[in-house]
Amino acid sequence: MDLVFQSSLPHQYREPLERLVFFNPNQISMQAAIAHALDLYGAPAVALEPAGLTVRIQGCPHAQCLFALEPAARTVDPLLAGMLVYVRTGIEELLVLHIAVSEVHGRTRRSGLGVAMRLIRELRAAARRLRGIRWIRLLYTGDRQFQIRIGSTAEGAAAHEPAREWARLVS
């Protein structure tokens, strides 16, 4: 599946974005983790900013988004496949506050994890370009700490090891 990544969305994506964030049937499987994230950082809200639509977090004004879009036919807008919201919590860490996969893309465990892992890989690639970032930590892993090391591909060994471990945690 081809995905395109961007940090904001055109205004016509408001309804799909609201469905993804607030009315996503896939949320049930992560209900406790989502509640924990809401308790710690506050509720998400869809916001229209000069660059386009984004998701803001009540208690985290510096949170940023990464959206995954699946290109469709030429005459149709790309489909919103998923998104994640993250924040830099210190000099060395990015924390993923929320991650969501659309109902269509999350119909099977494999396709849902595929979108989620592509989002995390894209964030990891961006993190390599940020000075000082050494870790990405995922909040949706319950009581376990899950961190992805940032470094060269040689340092990170197999890029798929974090994917397998995270898939095991959310299953």
Image: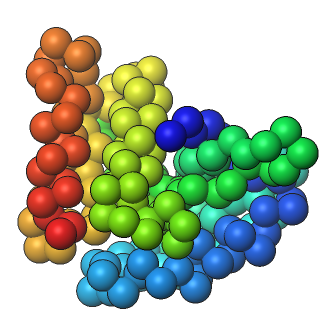
> Residue 139, percent across and down?
28, 64
Horizontally, is 94 left or right of 142 in the view?
Answer: right
> Residue 82, percent across and down?
53, 57
Vertical placement of residue 129 versus 45, above or below: above
Q: Quadrant of residue 45?
A: bottom right
> Residue 110, percent across and down?
31, 56
Quadrant including the C terminus: bottom left
Q: Quadrant of residue 23?
A: bottom right
Q: Which scheme is used to colour this image of the protein? A: rainbow
Residue 5 visible, this angle: no
Write the residue at 68% across / 76% down. Answer: 18
Give whichever of 29, 149 is nearer the camera.
29
Vertical placement of residue 48 versus 86, above or below: below
Exactly how many numbered labels are in the figure? 0
Write the residue at 18% across / 42% down. Answer: 162
Vertical placement of residue 46 versus 122, above or below: below
Horizontally, is 88 left or right of 153 in the view?
Answer: right
Write the residue at 29% across / 44% down. Answer: 136
Horizontally, is 57 left or right of 162 in the view?
Answer: right
> Residue 57, percent across and down?
56, 70
Write the residue at 41% across / 41% down. Answer: 118
Q: Residue furthest front?
A: 73
Horizontally, is 89 left or right of 142 in the view?
Answer: right
Residue 2 visible, this angle: yes
Vertical placement of residue 2 versus 69, above or below: above
